[in-house]
Image (cartoon, rainbow, N blue to C red):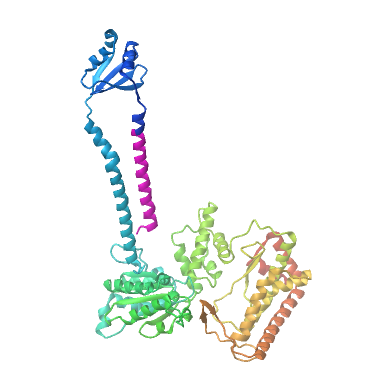
Amino acid sequence: MKSPIKGLLLNIFYVVLIFLVLGSLFSFFGKSSGTIKEISITQLVQDINSEKVEKVTSNEDELKIVYKDKSEAITKKETNDTIGQALSDYGVDKEKLKNVSFSFGNQSKVSDWLWAFFLFVLLPFIVFGIFFWLVVRQAKTGAAQTFDFTKAKAKLFGAEGHPKEKVTFKDVAGLKEEKEELKEIVDFLKHPDKYLKMGARIPKGVLLVGPAGCGKTLLARAVAGESNVPFFSVAGSSFVEMFVGVGSGRVRSLFAAAKKHQPCLIFIDELDSIGKTRGPAITGGHEEREQTLNQLLTEMDGFEQNDKIIILAATNRSDVLDPALLRPGRFDRKVVINLPDIQEREDILSIHTNGKPLDKNVKIREVAERTPGFSGADLSNVINEAAISAAKNNNKTITQVNLLNSIEKVLLGPERKSHVLSEKEKKITAYHEAGHALVSAMVPNAEPVRKISIISRGMAAGYTLKVPSEERYFKTKAELESSIAVALGGYCAERFIFGDISTGASDDLSKASRIARGIVKTYGMSSLGPITFGDRDVEVFLDREYGERKNYSESVAESIDKEVEDIIRRAEQEAEKIIKDNKNLIEKIVGVLMEKETIEREEFEAIIKSKK
């Protein structure tokens, strides 16, 4: 639909253009009538006798004279006199008169009057009529848009006239259990009568829960593609406006449209934008978002048993959803979508590399091993960045180097080649990263080092990539303590070598403190016993979320702080001992880093083995 502002600007342009054309016409005719000079009949006779006149045109009482120098003039004669008689009366030389060409026009005064009447009377009325017609048409457009304001902004896919690339379960890598859970929905949409005859009630709502980028929207499209039914897609935020009642009106219009296309699917993305837990309105009235949620609950309750409409919703914040949304009869089924494991990552990478010119030495498995914790969207971005890098370097294929570099680019950001470290800063960074790597190689239960680099990326002056050798869903207390020791390795290396510390360790200290507090307060792994401290029911007030309420005394808080300090001190002592005992080894690692700036896993392991 055309924008009202754009339409108004177009109308103004048309009106200005019309006035410009009129101004040009008036100036043209005004100029044409004002440039011809008027002379007397006596002057005309003198000019004829002087052989200056080339042509005379008679138009009733008006004579138009054209001189030999192409200038023009006009004069008038008596009404009843002929042109010859008028010139003879004023003493024209008849011999000279023979050299002048005469012609007679028959333009009538009526035509002049009609032309003037059209220009100065009718044309202004026509122009203003067109202007008011444009204004009225614009007003009608605005009124139509006003009535459309409460209609849902949902995109309809799968119906006639709305072609869309079809997505099926084959296009969704991994998620085997999740796809099995949704096959019942697909079967119901394909064969609804089979279930209705048995009196079975298919779930009205299916909630897809998982981190961002894990494929919730893609899975919803795959359900629609497998079912081959119309698919209404709408974002939760599109329901909410500043005007009260608009959101609930859009919910009503969405379900009214869906009932005309059943069996069908409604997909609401980011459900938490309208489905947050209701509370007392700060303004004393009903919030627009709460009215929208109330209308959604009413519509889901209003489904008849034979309605063949299923709602799919996606969110990564199921903890803030209103309990009324999650009760049976509304969102009956919750499908949790987790981050992909190594095999699923390999399958996802294979789908995204399909059709791309890969080098024959590319190892998708290695890329999958180096990307733990990556979502499907992250993996798609890795392949895309690799393709961009290969094209930028004019390569004919995507190489393994392109893929591995793109992982670091997605994780940390692009290389900051313009950010040149001084020799001192470069040396501090080298010892810092070498400290991380050395402690990671020496402490038990630590993740193996994949790469060490002192090339700046993003906010980091250097980095040490550690990748687990196998997929892990749980961590022991020993593994968590080893992670703290590794995080403090750079800090301890700087202090041991230079006798001073830099601000580069701030992120490591924050990470170590967070893990230590988790050991004490969340996981119950300290001497305080198997107790969790802090109520983690999320509170929402003025759209700010508070993740923890203090449910323990000040004396317990002091004990927690003491436990956290003890854990970090033990890890610090362990890291410091490893660095002191292996000073020659850390010097060797730093020497290679200062020369090459990067150490890969194989070279690093060879350095460690040479010491052993």
Q: Position of residue 542 (x, y in %)?
A: 51, 77
Q: Which residues are magenta?
A: 1-29
Q: Position of residue 526 (x, y in %)?
A: 64, 88
Quarter assignment of residue 410: bottom right
Is residue 3 something that shows in the picture? no
Question: Is residue 549 rendered magenta in the image?
Answer: no
- Would you say 72 lies left or right of 417 here? left
- Direction top: furthest residue: 95
- Would you say 11 lies left or right of 600 here? left
Is residue 174 something that shows in the picture? yes
Quarter assignment of residue 202: bottom left
Asked whether 609 or 33 is in front, the reply is: 33
Q: Position of residue 338 (x, y in %)?
A: 48, 76
Q: Position of residue 413 (x, y in %)?
A: 58, 63
Residue ID at (29%, 66%): 159
Residue ID at (36%, 75%): 248
Quadrant location of the N terminus in the rendered image: bottom left
> In this rendering, is residue 422 above or below 575?
above
